[in-house]
């Protein structure tokens, strides 16, 4: 329906508009779009963090599916305070790394 590669097709990132720098989520829509088309290399170049989160979600879903198929009671993915903290710190480190000269390859 919409192409995330077209500037402004999904609106604008408020962080990018205010600071001129990409946030940790910038390029995430493009990355997911490219993953659905099977282009892993381009998806990673759009947003490595988003691709990592999608990979984690797919693995968690597969584990849940296998447990359910074996009749093992399995809950959906739960978010502990530790998990949220780790993901928040990882997003912050990724966002800061994008802004450094040695992490410029992470920028969308």
Image (cartoon, grey):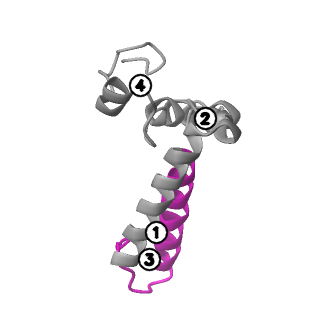
47 left or right, relative to 2: right
Residue at mark 1: 86
Q: Residue 17 appears at what percent x and percent y? A: 33, 23
Q: Main secondary structure of the magenta part?
A: helix
How would you rate the neighbour count of disc 1 (Cα within 10 Å): few for under 14, some for 14-19, many for 20 or more?
A: few
Q: Residue at x 44, y 13 (%)?
A: 6
Residue at mark 2: 43
Q: Residue 13 appears at what percent x and percent y? A: 33, 29
Give the number of the mark in front: 1 or 2.
1
Residue at mark 4: 20
Q: Which badge, 2 or 4, comes first in the chain's sequence? A: 4
Which residue is at the front of the view, 37 or 71? 37
Say what secondary structure mark 2 lies in.
Answer: helix
Asked if residue 55 lies in the magenta stretch, the reply is yes
Label 1 – label 2 distance at C-alpha: 23 Å
Quarter holding the C terminus is top right
Residue at mark 3: 68
Q: Residue 67 appears at what percent x and percent y? A: 49, 79
Label 2 – label 4 distance at C-alpha: 22 Å
Q: Are marks 3 and 4 in contact (CB under 8 Å)?
A: no
Label 1 – label 3 distance at C-alpha: 27 Å
How would you rate the neighbour count of disc 3 (Cα within 10 Å): few for under 14, some for 14-19, many for 20 or more?
A: few
Q: Residue at x 32, y 22 (%)?
A: 10
93 left or right, relative to 80: right
């Amino acid at each position: 329906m919409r192409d995330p590669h077209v500037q402004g097709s999904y609106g604008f990132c408020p962080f990018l508009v205010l600071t001129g720098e990409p946030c940790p989520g910038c390029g995430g829509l493009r990355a997911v779009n490219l993953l659905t088309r099977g282009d892993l290399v381009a998806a990673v170049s759009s947003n490595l963090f988003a691709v990592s989160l999608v990979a984690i979600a797919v693995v968690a879903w597969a584990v849940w599916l296998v447990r359910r198929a074996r009749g093992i009671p399995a809950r959906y993915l739960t978010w502990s305070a530790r998990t949220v903290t780790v993901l928040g710190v990882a997003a912050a480190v990724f966002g800061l790394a994008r802004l450094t000269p040695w992490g410029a390859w992470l920028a969308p």
